Amino acid sequence: MKNTSTILLAATLCVLVFVGSARADCCRRTKNVSFTVESGRCKDVGGVNSSISTCTITICADGTRLIGSYCGHYSCNLFGCNCGGGCLKGKWEKNFIERHPKYKIRILSSKWN
C-alpha cells in the first residue's frame, strides 16, 4: 500500500510539472545555419568549420549563438519553458548578420531544429 501511494504521488507531481510547463512560453526553437565569412574566421562569430570554406552555427531568434539548451533570456525549466524574461525574439539570420557586420557573412542555408 505504501508503494502504491508513493507511485501515485510521483505520477501526480509529474503531471503537474507537465501541465504547468505546457501553458508556459517555451523557448526550444533554434536554427542550424550554414554560412561563409569573407573577412575573418568561423570562430570569430561563434561558428565552427564544417568544411574548408563553410561554417555552421546554431542560433536563437535574436541571432545569437545558442548557449546551453534553450533560447530564453535567463534559465528555463527542464522542458525549455518558463524561461526567465521570456524567449529571445528577432529575425534569426538577419539578426545574426547584423550582429557581425565587419565579417561580411553570407548565409548559404538554414534549417529548423
Image (cartoon, rainbow, N blue to C red):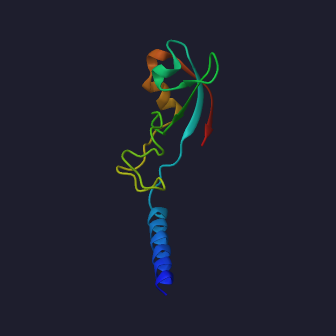
Q: Nearer the viewer, residue 23 or 10?
A: 10
What residue is rendered at 63% in x and 16% in y?
52
What residue is rendered at 49% in x and 63% in y?
22
Q: Which of 64 and 93 is in front in this view?
A: 64
Q: Residue 3 at x, y = what percent?
A: 49, 81
Q: Is residue 49 above or below residue 74?
A: above
Extreme residue toward the front, this view: 2
Q: Residue 4 at x, y = what percent?
A: 51, 83
Q: Is residue 81 above or below residue 36?
A: below
What residue is rendered at 49% in x and 87% in y?
1
Decide if residue 101 is on the left or right side of residue 31.
Answer: left
Q: In this view, does 92 lie above or below 28?
A: above
Q: How many marks on residues?
A: 0
What residue is rendered at 48% in x and 69% in y?
14
Decide if residue 104 is on the left or right side of residue 52.
Answer: left
Q: Residue 64 at x, y = what percent?
A: 45, 33
Q: Which of 81 and 11 is in front in this view?
A: 11
Q: Residue 29 at x, y = what percent?
A: 53, 46
